[in-house]
Amino acid sequence: MAWVILIAAGLLEAVWATAMQASKGFRRWRPTVLFVVAMLASMGGLAWAMLEIPTGTAYAVWVGVGAVATVALQAARGKERLTVVRSLLLVLLVGCLVGLKLVS
């Protein structure tokens, strides 16, 4: 269950990162509220997962999931270009995250 919470927390990292950019320096209130809520939920999920998963592994997975999800979200929104090389590197990153799960 801790792994599911950790992955969800990582996905929320993509939400708060996107909301932070959309807030335009915290001048727009709706994205700012979404940023705060998503960040608190993301950090809470990370903290909860760390009760069962070693800190280094949990943090690496959280950051990795958040990074991949943020790039995917921005590419889907047309805000970022997803090249073949970038796609391969993201696949490698996901492979590393799966590897961390397998050896934990």
Image (spheres, grey):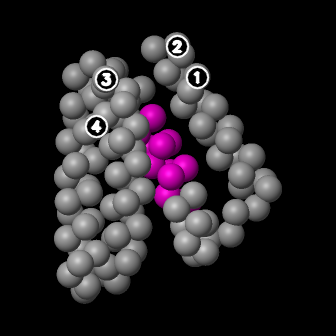
Span shown in magenta = 60-71
Q: Secondary structure at mark 1?
A: helix
Q: Secondary structure at mark 4?
A: helix
Query: Is mark 2 in CB contact (under 8 Å) with mark 1?
Result: yes
- Residue at left 68%, top 38%? 92
Q: Tell me the amino acid under the disc marked 3.
A: Met
Q: Is residue 77 magenta?
A: no
- Quarter of the image for the N terminus: give it: top left
- Residue at left 24%, top 45%? 43
Q: Nearer the viewer, residue 86 or 69?
A: 69
Quick check: 72 above or below 61?
A: below
How far apart, in angstroms, are the residues tagged by discs 2 and 4? 19 Å
Residue under pointer 4: 46
- Residue at left 20%, top 42%? 44
Query: Is mark 2 in CB contact (under 8 Å) with mark 4?
Result: no
Q: How far across and how far down the image is residue 38, in percent? A: 26, 57
Q: Secondary structure at mark 3?
A: loop
N-terminal of the pair, mark 3 or mark 1, is 3
Q: Tell me the amino acid under the disc marked 2.
A: Val
The mark found on residue 99 in the picture is 1
N-terminal of the pair, mark 2 or mark 3, is 3
Image-based side of 43 in relation to 103, left or right: left
Residue under pointer 3: 1
How far apart, in angstroms, are the residues tagged by discs 4 and 3? 12 Å
Residue under pointer 2: 103
How far apart, in angstroms, are the residues tagged by discs 1 and 4? 19 Å
Query: Is mark 3 in CB contact (under 8 Å) with mark 1?
Result: no
Q: How far across and how far down the image is residue 10, in percent? A: 39, 44
Image-based side of 59 in relation to 89, left or right: left
Quick check: 10 above or below 76?
A: above
